[in-house]
Amino acid sequence: MIPIRDNVPSRRLPVITIGLLVVNVVIFLYEIALGPGVEGMLMRFGTIPYEVVHRVDLPPPTVRPIYLTLFTSMFLHGSYSHIIGNMLYLWIFGDNVEDLMGKVRFIIFYLICGLVAGLSHVLASPGSQVPAIGASGAIAGVLGAYLVLYPRARVLVLILFGFFFRATYLPAIIVLGLWFIVQLFSGVASLPGAGRGGGVAWFAHIGGFVAGLALVKLFQKHPPVRRYGGTDFGL
């Protein structure tokens, strides 16, 4: 299930959301330009749980202080599908959350959710020496906030059935609720002894989403749009 757009109008130009999109894309293009040298960049600026837990710097040298990688890792991506997926979710849901928080509050909220997401991954995999990268934890916080603010918003999604697909509108509570359930079950399945691993930092998604749910009301500045196009989708 791939989201395409929602039916919630933005009342202001989402400057921060657009800025985050641009920064992430520019950094990704720089990663591509590095070629094989990108591995060193990811090791230096990605979050390595073992380093954070034990406060040690494994070779190659990591950005100092080591805790800074919890922030720098938010702006790195490992593939085209990785960044396209993250930026798609940010574009669809970020503008409305920014609209209700304002620019300054939104960027602070975004970074805090990303920090909580990174720490959640560290706690879930304290011995991992693999760098965790991506904006998905911070964006998960945006999804959590959107769910609280607009549970009945209509989201156009693409549902795949093998080689066939169908586009349909679903309530945000279903789209984002199912997304979180997938993250939760995948996270549990990735725990040691569960019989399945993987390269996705599931607990970063879980931690970021929960942070968004918990913090949204503290950062909300404006009331949500109540009606649009004759459809009530506010709280």
Image (cartoon, rainbow, N blue to C red):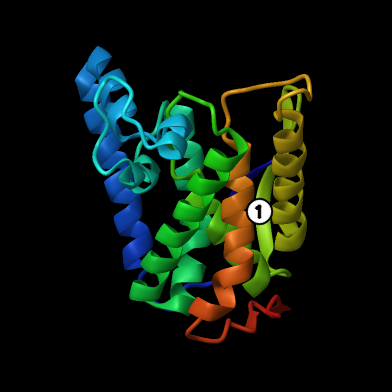
Residue 158 occupies which quadrant of the picture? top right
Would residue 218 be found to the left or right of residue 131 on screen? right
Counting from the top left corner in percent of width and height, residue 166 is at: 74, 40
Q: Which residue lies furthest to the top in this view?
A: 36
Q: Quadrant of the N terminus?
A: top right
Residue at 35% of width from left, 48% of height from top?
71
Kindly identify the residue that appears in the image at 45 percent across and 66 percent down.
Answer: 109
Q: Residue 214: horizontal and vertical position, in percent? A: 62, 69
Task: Name the residue nearer the viewer: 49 or 103.
Answer: 49
Q: Residue drawn at (51%, 47%), measured in percent from left and top? A: 119
Residue 64 in the image: above or below residue 12 = above
Residue 231 spot, x, y in % from top left: 71, 77
Residue under the image location 58 percent in, 82 percent down: 225
Residue 120 visible? The answer is yes
Left or right: where does residue 151 sit relative to residue 214?
right
Q: How crowded is mark 1: few (under 14 residues within 10 Å), some or many (20 or more)?
A: many
Res 89 seen here: no
Q: Dot 1 lies on which element?
A: strand
The one of 49 and 176 positioned closer to us in this rendering: 49
User: Between residues 116 and 148, which one lies in front from this camera angle?
Assistant: 116
Q: Mark 1 points at which residue?
A: 156
Location of residue 148 by image quarter: bottom right
What is the number of callouts on the image?
1
Residue type (three-letter) at the residue carrying disc 1: Leu
Query: Which quadrant: the C terminus?
Result: bottom right
